[in-house]
Amino acid sequence: MLSYIARRLVIAIPTLILVSIFVFVLQKLLPGDPALVLAGEERDPEMLAFIREKYRLNDPIIMQYFYWMKAMLQGDLGISLRTRQPVLDLIGDKLPVTVQLAVMAMIIAFAIGIPAGILSAVKKGTAVDYIANFVALSGLSIPNFWLGIMLIMLVSVHLGWLPASGYVSPFEDPVKSFQTMIMPAFVLGTALAATLMRHTRSAMLGVLKADYVRTARAKGLLEHTVILKHAFRNALLPIVTLSALLFGELLAGAVLTEQIFTIPGFGKLIVDAVFTRDYAVVQGVVMCTAAGFILMNLVADVLYFLLNPRMRSSL
Amino acid sequence: MSKAIDLNAAPVLSVENLALRFKGAPANIIDGISFAVRPGETLCIVGESGCGKSVTALSLMGLLPRSVAQVMSGTAMFGDHDLLELSQRAMADLRGNTISMIFQEPMTSLNPSYRIGDQIAEVVLRHKSVTRAEARQRALQMLDRVKIPAASSRLDDYPHELSGGMRQRVMIAMALANDPAVLIADEPTTALDVTIQAQIIDLIEELQKETGTALVMITHDLGVVAEIADRVCVMYAGHMVEDGPVEAIFDDPQHPYTIGLMSSVPSVGPRSGRLAAIGGMVPAIDNMPSGCRFTPRCPFAQTNCAVSQPPLDELGPSHRAACHYAPLETVFPEAVFQEAGS
Ligand SMILES: Nc1ncnc2c1ncn2[C@@H]1O[C@H](COP(=O)(O)OP(=O)(O)OP(=O)(O)O)[C@@H](O)[C@H]1O
Ligand code: SF4
Ligand SMILES: [Mg+2]
């Protein structure tokens, strides 16, 4: 198992290097001179030269890349060109917010998507199935920003039940934190629930036809045991893999949803950074997101591994 | 063939005139199926692929949803219960407990995610009030009885760690774990290597002798029939065309279809040959003659055969055949009779 994880981690390294090159080159190709941004309004030529020297902007691009990589490997993601804060600190600030949002959204997605998927597979071709599919399709086609705005109008503005925006850390005030996060989590969660429901349904339809499900019935097992223990257990593999990937996507930041609910997460960080040409932050966030995504891929693989006896014993 | 079966004993399972129809189908997929098995008795159901053997077995087990396969007529008395009338829940209480089934597909019939010991123990826990430890003990005992070598070390194996033959042994262990009164075996060896086939058949026969369970064996293999059957029931295109004691079916077949089958078996030795290739094809379900379903292929067919359904007539001691012209010798000259198989 450990050697398997180690192998997967080693495979992840070239991927990360590729991402880093891509991020770096893209950055360099974008219009806009970071020295100008840093120099501010005056654009004093001496100041510009000093800045170029200090940030080694005059060195060959390839060297600039290596300086950047070296610093990054030492945990130095650079300094925000705008706020002068270390990028690592900025990320450290925003990441927990996004993780909290992602976890809450995932819980909502599981709670809705999996039971709905199982039910619509078991009741295939009945009204229950059609309704579940219709709701899922609506969930997929309603844009998050629209649902978010509608929720704010209804729940916050009209009914006044929940705050429309803002963020409170769960360590400061768990209840308040929950109240501020539940609506955006719901918006993200329902969209994922629709995807999850459709995958659960098709995985369940596959396994419900399996011979071992017939065997389970031939043993006289009750229907809920047949479905949950014998069928669903085998449908879990694709669901778990998908969930890990969905979670990885959530970590990349839900840009629009965070904007609408003004949640200071990753999504907001990257949007602000792009608009202000804050290169160091953009690079740091993208690298961090890529690493997170690769990590979730690894988690997916490991879970797949743990759930599958055939793979487990092949070690 | 020489088992001590009490012919006066009441049958444990007695099927009478069973007919099923798939939803929307123009004709019954099986029709007029009648047979009975007594404790310790072996009934073989034979017939070409697609003639409805599995459908018959699955419907008795309640494993064909009634919404898909409608019961058009018939009863299936198992003790005091009519299996065709029982509620889902009541049927589930019998399945795997007093009536069990093993399937055609050993490779895929076990759940790949659970250890085989747990899968056997599960059926015991479902039907008997025992502790987990006792159920596991029973699973071990059953693995031993189906002759899985080093059973105690196999208990925690996953299905993929076993060969097809071993998996079928596990299925047998599971099916017999609660000492059922009836075991239905649906072509349990078709998917296995020839050498393994014989072992599995011998094992089933041996366990049946030990336990006295009634066995309904569905098979293609006339060699198996000759070896283990007490009675034989021959199906053709969903109809029962002949049934009787194994000796009568082999030595004195009465229905032209059975005669065709038997003439293809050079000698009735153990496991020789499969079902004969009889000229022609089984009609599709939407093209079935309303009378005798064998009409298009029958060398003896007369004009009335296609339209009038021959009843199962008693032709000898508990020997019945469904043919208007049986026994054929009384109707046709001997010369024609010789050609029946070709
Ligand atoms: N769920 C179903 N819906 C419609 N038709 C079905 C269904 N299940 C089986 N059939 C049809 O019923 C017929 C009988 O099938 P069955 O499986 O009983 O044959 P069999 O005698 O067991 O054949 P084999 O020896 O190949 O196992 C086949 O023509 C099959 O296509
Ligand atoms: S009833 Fe007619 S068609 Fe059918 S088996 Fe007898 S002779 Fe042949
Ligand atoms: Mg079959």
Image (cartoon, coloured by chain):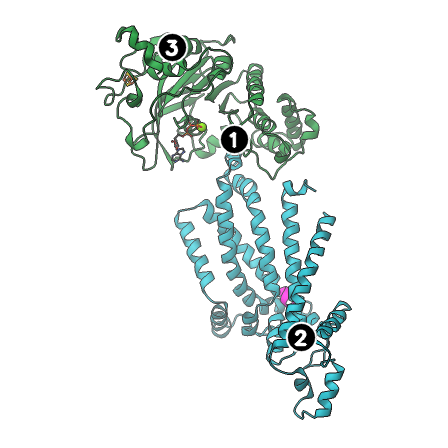
Question: Which labelled disc corresponds to residue B318?
Answer: 3
Up the image or down, A160 lies above or below B167; here it is: below
Q: Mark 2 points at which residue?
A: A281
Quadrant hosting residue B340: top left
Question: Which labelled disc corresponds to residue A53?
Answer: none
A54 vs A18, left or right, is: right
Residue B323 at x, y percent in the picture? 30, 15
Chain in cyan on the image: A
**Count of numbered tags:** 3
Check residue A239 for magenta coloring. no
Residue A273 at x, y percent in the picture? 63, 77
The local crowd at label 2, few if under 14, some if 14 to 19, many if 20 or more residues have their Cα within 10 Å, is many
The local crowd at label 3, few if under 14, some if 14 to 19, many if 20 or more residues have their Cα within 10 Å, is few
Chain in green on the image: B
Q: In which quarter of the image is ligand 1?
A: top left
Cα distance between the residues tagged 1 and 3: 33 Å
B153 vs B282, left or right, is: right
* Dominant secondary structure of the residues highlighted in magenta in the image: helix
- For mark 1, name the chain: B
Foreground mark, 1 or 3?
Answer: 1
Do we see residue B56 in this rendering? yes
- For mark 3, name the chain: B
Up the image or down, B1 lies above or below B73; here it is: above
Circle 1: residue type: Glu
| Residues shaded magenta | A96-100
Asked if ligand 3 lies within 8 A of label 1, the reply is: no
Q: Are marks 1 and 3 in contact (CB under 8 Å)?
A: no
Check residue A97 for magenta coloring. yes
Q: Earlier in the sequence, mark 1 or mark 3?
A: 1
Cα distance between the residues tagged 1 and 2: 59 Å
Q: Name the residue under label 1.
A: B105
